[in-house]
Structure formats: C-alpha cells, structure tokens
Amino acid sequence: MAKGDLPFLDRLAQLPAVRVTEILAVLQGLERPNLDPVVGPLFGTDDEGDPAVNPLVPAVLQQFQSKEDLTCYAALLEGLTGIWNAAVRSAVVARLRAAGLPQDDLLLRLQALSPTLGFASEEDREWAREWLADPFTQDALLVQQCIVRVLLALRGMAEVRAQSLIEDSGR
C-alpha cells in the first residue's frame, strides 16, 4: 500500500506530535486569521467592525493549556469522538422514542446500551438529567466545542505537514 493510500487518520498519526499548547502561537502567527480556510470562520468582526473571535475559541484554548501533554492528534480524536457520541445519542434516542419508550425509562435504557454514550458513569448523573431535559441544546453546544477543537487541532497539525512538505521539496 502506498503512503497516500493510508487512511487519513493513519497518515495524521504519522506526523510528529504537536502539543496543543503550540496552537496559540500558530494563531498569533496568522496575519489575518479570518482569511485562513480552516480557522477563518472562527474569526470575524463585531457590530462596530472590530476584530472578534467565536466565544468557544478562548474556552477551547484554555482547555488545551490546562492539558500541556495533549497533542493535536489526541485533541482531534477527542473532538471527533465527541461529535460521534452526540450523533449516536441522537440516533438512539430518536429510535427509542419512535418505539414508544416512556421518558422515565429512557435514561435507564441509555445507561444500559453503551458506556461510551456518556450515561453510564455515576459522576455524570446530573449531566444525563440535564441532557434528557434538553438534548438538542446540550449536544449542540458539545458539537460546536468539538468542531472548534477539531479545526484548531487540524490547523496545528497542518503547520507540521507544511514544514515537512517544504523540507522534502528542498531535497
């Protein structure tokens, strides 16, 4: 199998590790971040025309800074996993409700189905109740945070890939 034939995540995993704490330097190095094709949608202007940033960006960057050993690849996988779990939760709940499962039994059934859906853990009971009260809002915010995480992680990893491409072409 040629290197280009490897699945995308396998190719990304072969890149040198980039710590998520380095993403801030990447962002600061962008002259006009709003024109970047990957992270540009996270930046814009406010009503007065001043530069503005999506409020989730500082929150995600703060999470990144609290995990100094976290790599961009791991952050990418965390983001994709969060989106996947939200999608599966939505599909499962839709099917259970369509089958007529009473609301009172929904949480119990979700807890029994899969520990990765986020309902099985004892410490997440309050989150599960909040989620059941308004699953759309709970997962929509999670998915938005995960998308920001994925975009920032990909942008950080792209810097490493760009450097390797430039070095390879100079040989």
Image (tube, rainbow, N blue to C red):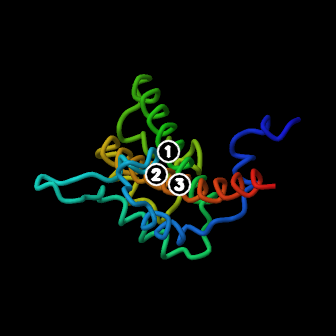
Residue 163 image offset from top left, x and y in percent: 66, 58
Residue 47 image offset from top left, x and y in percent: 12, 52
* Image mark count: 3
- Choose between 91 and 36: the one closer to the eye: 36
Within the image, what quadrant is residue 99 found in? top left
Crowding around mark 1 (Cα neighbors within 10 Å: few <14, some 14 to 19, many 20+) is many
Q: Earlier in the sequence, mark 1 or mark 3?
A: 1
Label 1 near label 2: C-beta < 8 Å? yes
Q: Earlier in the sequence, mark 2 or mark 3?
A: 2
Mark pair 2, 3: CA separation: 14 Å
Q: Earlier in the sequence, mark 2 or mark 1?
A: 1
Within the image, what quadrant is residue 17 found in? bottom right
Foreground tag (1 vs 3): 3
Residue at the spot 54% in from the left edge and 70% down from the top edge: 22
Residue 2 image offset from top left, x and y in percent: 86, 37
- Judging by the rendered image, the residue that carries numbered circle 2 is 146
Mark pair 2, 1: CA separation: 6 Å
Mark pair 1, 3: CA separation: 18 Å
Label 3 near label 1: C-beta < 8 Å? no
- Judging by the rendered image, the residue that carries numbered circle 3 is 155
Residue at the spot 38% in from the left edge and 55% down from the top edge: 33
- Choose between 80 and 8: the one closer to the eye: 8
Is 24 positioned to the left or the right of 6 in the image?
Answer: left
The type of residue carrying mark 3 is Arg
Look at the picture and state if 79 lies above or below 8: below
- Judging by the rendered image, the residue that carries numbered circle 1 is 83
Crowding around mark 2 (Cα neighbors within 10 Å: few <14, some 14 to 19, many 20+) is many
The type of residue carrying mark 1 is Ile
